[in-house]
Image (spheres, rainbow, N blue to C red):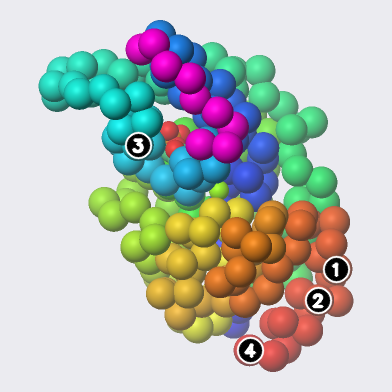
Amino acid sequence: MTGFIFDLDGVIVDTAKYHFLAWKKLANELGFEFTEEQNELFKGVSRKRCLEILLDIGNIKSNQEQFDTWMVQKNLDYLEYIEKMNESEILPNVPKILKYLKEEGFPIALGSASKNARPILEKVKLLPYFDVIVDGNSVTKAKPNPEVFLIAAEQLGVVPENCIVFEDALAGIEAANIAGMTSIGIGDEKTLSKADFNFNDFTEISLEFIEKLVNSK
Ligand code: BG6
Ligand code: MG
């Protein structure tokens, strides 16, 4: 049996822009600039680690209380940005692939670093496709640690070797590779060159490709 594991941010929905806006707002309030280029470093990375990197960029020292306040503040701003999200923000062809996998009876999991994964899936109405959700609330070790994908595989009842992971972040591709899963990079091929397969987006992934991949397992 083959299982499929999807990352959320940047794979199913383009939430990276909202994470960026919320981090940029915090950076500006703290008195420095934060660019889209720097935001690339934040993909797939936990909220806590993102704030550590942000404060490094701004050369800002903080005590625990300030750190916690900024974590909360960033998330409140992020929640405001995603408040109005709907199906129109699902990335192209994602529903088609999910529908196909569901109809074929493959188990499907979400493997995301985000603590906001479930409400986002609800907003874009994709929650019913997922048999298992492993998110930032259920893991202790962030990607590239494979924990998130290994828990997903276990809950799906599929051995890691038979899992196929869709990821847009290098940390996520590394996590899938370490877990012994097949990694599919969605996005820039140069950044994701460690992936077993690369596509710019889901419009490039045919159902025949998935069928062949499953049969090769
Ligand atoms: C990942 C994003 O999916 O989730 C990261 O790629 C983000 O950019 C991380 O920092 C944590 O998300 P959240 O919603 O828990 O702050
Ligand atoms: Mg991602």
Q: Secondary structure at mark 4?
A: loop
User: Mark 3 and mark 2: span between their CA atoms?
Assistant: 38 Å
In-front residue for pair 151/60: 60
Give the spatial CA distance, label 3 vs label 1: 37 Å
Q: Amino acid at mark 3?
A: Ile
In percent of the image, x 39 and y 61: which residue is there? 144
Q: Which residue is mark 2?
A: 209
The answer to whether 108 appears left or right of 144 in the picture is right
Residue lying at 86% horizontally and 76% vertically, measured from the top left: 208
Report how far apart the C-alphas of labels 1 and 2 lie in the structure. Answer: 5 Å
Q: Taking the image as drawn, is residue 132 in sight? A: no
Relative to 82, say whether 111 is above or below: below
Amino acid at the residue labelled 2? Phe
Give the mark toward the camera: 4 or 3.
Answer: 3
Sequence order check, earlier mark of 3 and 2: 3
Q: How many marks?
A: 4
Q: Main secondary structure of the magenta part?
A: loop
| Disc number for residue 53 | 3
Q: Is mark 2 within 8 Å of ligand 2?
A: no
- Tell me the element at label 2: helix
Q: Is residue 138 left or right of residue 101?
A: left
User: Is the C-beta separation of discs 1 and 2 under 8 Å?
Assistant: yes
User: Is the residue marked by circle 3 packed among few (<14), some (14-19), or many (20+) residues within 10 Å?
Assistant: some
Residue type at tag 4: Lys
Q: Where are the magenta residues, as a range? A: 30-38
Tell me the residue that label 4 is attached to. Answer: 217
Q: Which residue is mark 1?
A: 206
In the rendering, at what x and y percent does residue 158 appear?
49, 77
